Protein backbone atom coordinates (compact mmCIF):
# COMPACT_ATOMS: atom_id res chain seq x y z
CA UNK A 1 0.00 0.00 0.00
CA UNK A 2 1.38 3.40 -0.92
CA UNK A 3 0.80 6.71 0.83
CA UNK A 4 0.91 10.30 -0.28
CA UNK A 5 2.29 13.33 1.57
CA UNK A 6 0.72 16.75 1.16
CA UNK A 7 3.22 19.63 1.33
CA UNK A 8 2.37 22.50 3.60
CA UNK A 9 3.10 26.21 3.29
CA UNK A 10 4.80 28.55 5.82
CA UNK A 11 1.63 28.67 7.93
CA UNK A 12 1.30 24.88 8.13
CA UNK A 13 -1.69 24.78 5.75
CA UNK A 14 -1.82 22.45 2.75
CA UNK A 15 -0.02 24.03 -0.16
CA UNK A 16 -2.11 24.66 -3.24
CA UNK A 17 -0.99 23.32 -6.55
CA UNK A 18 0.65 25.69 -8.91
CA UNK A 19 3.55 28.08 -8.67
CA UNK A 20 4.52 28.75 -5.01
CA UNK A 21 4.38 32.29 -3.71
CA UNK A 22 7.86 33.83 -3.41
CA UNK A 23 9.09 34.69 0.07
CA UNK A 24 9.31 38.46 0.44
CA UNK A 25 12.18 38.88 2.91
CA UNK A 26 11.99 42.67 3.08
CA UNK A 27 8.27 42.65 3.89
CA UNK A 28 8.78 40.04 6.61
CA UNK A 29 11.72 42.00 7.99
CA UNK A 30 9.73 45.22 8.05
CA UNK A 31 6.93 43.48 9.94
CA UNK A 32 9.38 42.12 12.51
CA UNK A 33 11.05 45.52 12.81
CA UNK A 34 7.77 47.19 13.75
CA UNK A 35 7.07 44.59 16.44
CA UNK A 36 10.51 45.11 18.01
CA UNK A 37 10.09 48.87 17.61
CA UNK A 38 6.78 48.87 19.46
CA UNK A 39 7.47 46.29 22.16
CA UNK A 40 11.25 46.24 22.54
CA UNK A 41 13.43 43.17 22.23
CA UNK A 42 12.65 41.74 25.66
CA UNK A 43 8.94 42.47 25.34
CA UNK A 44 8.62 40.72 21.98
CA UNK A 45 7.54 37.07 22.07
CA UNK A 46 7.95 34.52 19.33
CA UNK A 47 4.18 34.39 18.98
CA UNK A 48 4.15 38.16 18.30
CA UNK A 49 6.65 37.72 15.49
CA UNK A 50 4.90 34.69 14.03
CA UNK A 51 1.61 36.56 13.93
CA UNK A 52 3.06 39.75 12.44
CA UNK A 53 5.24 38.02 9.86
CA UNK A 54 2.64 35.35 8.95
CA UNK A 55 5.27 32.63 9.28
CA UNK A 56 5.34 29.52 11.41
CA UNK A 57 8.28 29.11 13.83
CA UNK A 58 10.27 26.64 11.68
CA UNK A 59 10.01 28.94 8.66
CA UNK A 60 10.97 31.99 10.73
CA UNK A 61 14.02 30.26 12.17
CA UNK A 62 14.90 28.85 8.76
CA UNK A 63 14.84 32.31 7.19
CA UNK A 64 16.41 34.38 10.00
CA UNK A 65 18.17 31.95 12.33
CA UNK A 66 16.97 33.13 15.73
CA UNK A 67 15.12 35.93 17.46
CA UNK A 68 18.40 37.71 18.16
CA UNK A 69 19.61 37.43 14.57
CA UNK A 70 16.23 38.65 13.36
CA UNK A 71 16.47 41.65 15.68
CA UNK A 72 19.97 42.49 14.47
CA UNK A 73 18.84 42.34 10.85
CA UNK A 74 15.77 44.45 11.63
CA UNK A 75 17.96 47.10 13.28
CA UNK A 76 20.30 47.08 10.29
CA UNK A 77 17.31 47.53 7.99
CA UNK A 78 15.92 50.37 10.12
CA UNK A 79 19.29 52.13 10.35
CA UNK A 80 20.45 51.70 6.76
CA UNK A 81 22.10 54.89 5.40
CA UNK A 82 19.50 55.44 2.68
CA UNK A 83 16.68 55.21 5.25
CA UNK A 84 18.20 56.79 8.37
CA UNK A 85 16.77 60.26 9.01
CA UNK A 86 19.83 61.13 11.10
CA UNK A 87 22.32 60.13 8.41
CA UNK A 88 20.42 61.98 5.69
CA UNK A 89 20.23 65.15 7.82
CA UNK A 90 23.92 65.15 8.70
CA UNK A 91 24.90 64.64 5.07
CA UNK A 92 22.78 67.60 4.04
CA UNK A 93 24.88 70.25 2.26
CA UNK A 94 24.88 73.88 3.34
CA UNK A 95 25.18 75.62 6.71
CA UNK A 96 25.66 73.37 9.71
CA UNK A 97 22.74 75.00 11.51
CA UNK A 98 20.43 73.84 8.71
CA UNK A 99 21.75 70.30 9.08
CA UNK A 100 21.17 70.40 12.84
CA UNK A 101 17.65 71.73 12.38
CA UNK A 102 16.94 68.95 9.86
CA UNK A 103 18.37 66.41 12.30
CA UNK A 104 15.93 67.47 15.01
CA UNK A 105 12.82 68.37 13.02
CA UNK A 106 12.94 65.50 10.53
CA UNK A 107 13.43 62.99 13.32
CA UNK A 108 10.64 64.59 15.37
CA UNK A 109 8.33 64.20 12.39
CA UNK A 110 9.38 60.56 11.96
CA UNK A 111 8.92 59.88 15.67
CA UNK A 112 5.22 60.75 15.53
CA UNK A 113 4.45 59.27 12.11
CA UNK A 114 1.06 57.53 12.53
CA UNK A 115 2.15 54.80 10.10
CA UNK A 116 4.89 53.48 12.41
CA UNK A 117 5.46 52.98 16.15
CA UNK A 118 6.34 56.25 17.89
CA UNK A 119 9.87 57.12 18.90
CA UNK A 120 13.13 55.60 17.69
CA UNK A 121 13.84 51.88 17.58
CA UNK A 122 17.56 52.40 18.29
CA UNK A 123 16.79 54.49 21.38
CA UNK A 124 13.89 52.52 22.83
CA UNK A 125 14.04 48.86 21.89
CA UNK A 126 16.69 47.62 24.36
CA UNK A 127 16.42 49.94 27.36
CA UNK A 128 15.37 46.88 29.34
CA UNK A 129 17.65 43.88 28.87
CA UNK A 130 18.63 40.58 30.42
CA UNK A 131 22.11 39.03 30.71
CA UNK A 132 21.33 37.13 27.50
CA UNK A 133 20.59 40.34 25.58
CA UNK A 134 23.50 42.49 26.78
CA UNK A 135 25.03 42.15 23.32
CA UNK A 136 21.97 43.82 21.80
CA UNK A 137 22.11 46.61 24.37
CA UNK A 138 25.74 47.15 23.37
CA UNK A 139 24.81 47.07 19.66
CA UNK A 140 22.26 49.85 20.05
CA UNK A 141 24.58 51.88 22.26
CA UNK A 142 27.29 51.64 19.59
CA UNK A 143 24.82 52.85 16.94
CA UNK A 144 23.90 55.85 19.09
CA UNK A 145 27.59 56.58 19.58
CA UNK A 146 28.13 56.40 15.83
CA UNK A 147 25.41 59.02 15.35
CA UNK A 148 27.11 61.21 17.95
CA UNK A 149 30.43 60.74 16.16
CA UNK A 150 28.89 61.73 12.83
CA UNK A 151 27.37 64.84 14.38
CA UNK A 152 30.67 65.70 16.06
CA UNK A 153 32.47 65.33 12.73
CA UNK A 154 29.98 67.66 11.03
CA UNK A 155 30.43 70.25 13.79
CA UNK A 156 34.21 70.01 13.59
CA UNK A 157 34.11 70.50 9.84
CA UNK A 158 31.93 73.59 10.33
CA UNK A 159 34.33 74.97 12.91
CA UNK A 160 37.26 74.38 10.56
CA UNK A 161 35.63 76.26 7.67
CA UNK A 162 34.31 79.13 9.78
CA UNK A 163 30.73 77.99 10.06
CA UNK A 164 31.19 77.79 13.83
CA UNK A 165 33.45 79.95 16.00
CA UNK A 166 36.74 78.33 16.91
CA UNK A 167 35.99 78.54 20.62
CA UNK A 168 32.90 76.29 20.42
CA UNK A 169 33.37 72.99 22.25
CA UNK A 170 32.00 70.63 19.62
CA UNK A 171 32.14 67.59 21.90
CA UNK A 172 29.86 69.18 24.49
CA UNK A 173 27.62 70.64 21.79
CA UNK A 174 27.25 67.23 20.11
CA UNK A 175 26.36 65.59 23.44
CA UNK A 176 23.78 68.29 24.12
CA UNK A 177 22.14 67.92 20.72
CA UNK A 178 22.03 64.13 20.91
CA UNK A 179 20.48 64.36 24.39
CA UNK A 180 17.75 66.52 22.90
CA UNK A 181 17.28 64.07 20.03
CA UNK A 182 16.98 61.06 22.34
CA UNK A 183 14.59 63.01 24.57
CA UNK A 184 12.36 63.75 21.59
CA UNK A 185 12.11 60.03 20.96
CA UNK A 186 11.01 59.31 24.52
CA UNK A 187 8.50 62.18 24.52
CA UNK A 188 7.04 60.91 21.24
CA UNK A 189 6.59 57.46 22.75
CA UNK A 190 4.83 59.12 25.70
CA UNK A 191 2.33 60.75 23.34
CA UNK A 192 3.79 64.18 22.58
CA UNK A 193 2.48 65.86 19.45
CA UNK A 194 4.61 67.17 16.60
CA UNK A 195 3.81 70.72 17.70
CA UNK A 196 5.15 69.95 21.17
CA UNK A 197 8.31 68.38 19.77
CA UNK A 198 8.81 71.33 17.42
CA UNK A 199 8.58 73.61 20.44
CA UNK A 200 11.53 71.77 21.98
CA UNK A 201 13.43 72.15 18.71
CA UNK A 202 12.68 75.89 18.67
CA UNK A 203 14.23 76.31 22.12
CA UNK A 204 17.21 74.15 21.14
CA UNK A 205 17.91 76.28 18.08
CA UNK A 206 17.55 79.47 20.14
CA UNK A 207 20.18 78.02 22.49
CA UNK A 208 22.38 77.27 19.47
CA UNK A 209 22.08 80.86 18.23
CA UNK A 210 22.89 82.26 21.66
CA UNK A 211 25.93 80.00 21.96
CA UNK A 212 27.25 80.96 18.55
CA UNK A 213 26.61 84.69 19.06
CA UNK A 214 28.32 84.61 22.45
CA UNK A 215 31.31 82.73 21.04
CA UNK A 216 31.64 85.34 18.31
CA UNK A 217 31.43 88.13 20.84
CA UNK A 218 28.02 89.26 19.71
Image (cartoon, grey):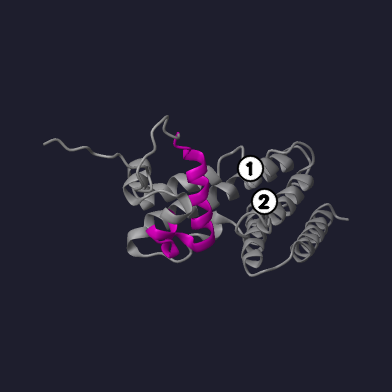
Q: Magenta segment: does it hold 32?
A: yes
SS class, disc 2: helix
The residue sitting at 82% across, 60% down in the picture is 206
Q: Is residue 132 left or right of residue 161?
A: left
Q: Position of residue 179 (x, y in %)?
A: 63, 61
The residue at which mark 1 appears reads as 87
Quarter of the C terminus within the rendering: bottom right
Q: Position of residue 48 (x, y in %)?
A: 44, 59
The residue at which mark 2 appears reads as 170
- Of residues 143 and 122, the one drawn nearer to the viewer in this rendering: 122
Quarter of the N terminus within the rendering: top left
Q: Residues within 10 Å of mark 1 (few under 14, many from 20)?
A: some
The residue sitting at 48% across, 47% down in the picture is 74
Image height check: is 179 above or below 83?
A: below
Quadrant of residue 180 in the image? bottom right
- The residue range painted magenta reads 22-49
Q: Position of residue 109 (x, y in %)?
A: 72, 54
Q: Residue furthest bottom?
A: 190
Amino acid sequence: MSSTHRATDATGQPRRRGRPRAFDRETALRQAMEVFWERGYEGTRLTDLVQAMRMNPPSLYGAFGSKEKLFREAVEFYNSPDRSTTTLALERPGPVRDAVEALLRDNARAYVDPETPHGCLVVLSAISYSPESEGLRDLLRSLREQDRDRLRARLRAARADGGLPGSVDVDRLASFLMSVLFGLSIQARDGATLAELDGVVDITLASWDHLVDTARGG
